Amino acid sequence: MTATLAFILLATFAAGIGSVWLAAGLMRLGWGPEPRVRGLKEQHLLSLAAGALLATAFMHLLPEALESQAGAHAMFATLLVGVVFFFLLDKAELWHHGHEHHHGSHDEEHSHAHGLAHAHDHDHEHKDQRTGGWAVLTGDSVHCFGDGILIASAFAASTHLGLVAALAVLAHEVPHHIGDLAVLRQSSRSRRAALVKVSLAGAVTPLGGLVGWWLVDRLADYLPYFLVVASSSFIYVALADLIPQLQKRLGARETLAQVAWLLSGIALVTVASLMGHGH
């Protein structure tokens, strides 16, 4: 059990704080949301994340849950409740994904005119930017805490499943944190201050992992349901947040690139799973 907890803390640290630092590094290389660098690079990250989340949910978490003694009807009912639950959290602005700025409109000029900071805080445009920044951090912290619980649930089932779940979380947190960093740079004194704030939110992920480990340890009989809830989170983020941003009218070359990166996300999770089984 101690080894499992160590794995959980390491994986949640990598997914929570590591994804923030990776996002900051990619922004330095030009993978940010500003109009001058928007486009295919962002689409690549989102496609990769969507593929990783869907593959983790449908190829690993759900099959693991369905192998339990719990009936399929109960499992799919839990999946439905989970999707609705995360939808309600999103409506309550407690499950920010940091991608809202990508939606834009079909008019390219209109899309460029509405940068990330404006779109992300669209509902708060009459409020102080600093207040909007803290709202982003609150939603981000709740999201990271939930990610930690989900990763812990996967590790409780098996180490390889936990690694796959952590990798999927890392993949979708990178574009998430790119959005958060861009927003907070509008309300923070410096880039370093924005990085520290988002890193603190990411640090909530290990806390969620610790709480998740404690819960699953005491509710071991309900582990299949924890796995299904984790699946519902991944499916909701992929289908409600990421995939819609990829449904823009693009040329054949750009569309093929999207599909290739989506398949790369699936392949990444598959390879990670095979490596985990090898240990």
Image (cartoon, rainbow, N blue to C red):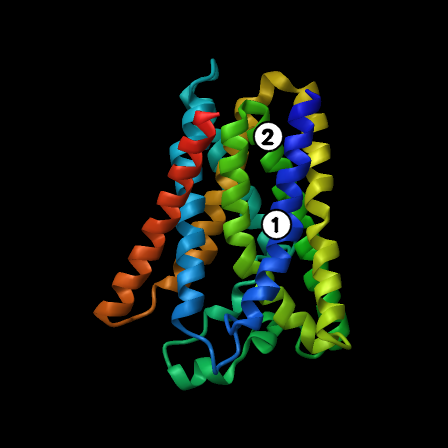
- Residues 238 and 275: in front is 275
* Residue 108 placement, left or right of 132: left
Residue occupying image coordinates x 39% and y 41% = 55
Tell me where residue 53 appears, x and y as whole percent. 45, 45
Residue with the most extreme top position: 69
Q: Is residue 182 above or below residue 1?
A: below
Q: Report the amino acid beneath label 1.
A: Leu
Q: Earlier in the sequence, mark 1 or mark 2?
A: 1
Tell me where residue 86 appears, x and y as whole percent. 56, 46
Disc 1 or disc 2, which is closer to the eye? 2
- Residues 264 and 241: in front is 264
Residue occupying image coordinates x 75% and y 55% = 200
Residue occupying image coordinates x 36% and y 77% = 106
Numbered circle sitting on residue 153? 2
Numbered circle sitting on residue 89? 1
Tell me where residue 178 appears, x and y as whole percent. 57, 65
Element type at marker 2? Answer: helix
Q: Report the amino acid beneath label 2.
A: Ser
- Residues 205 and 87: in front is 205
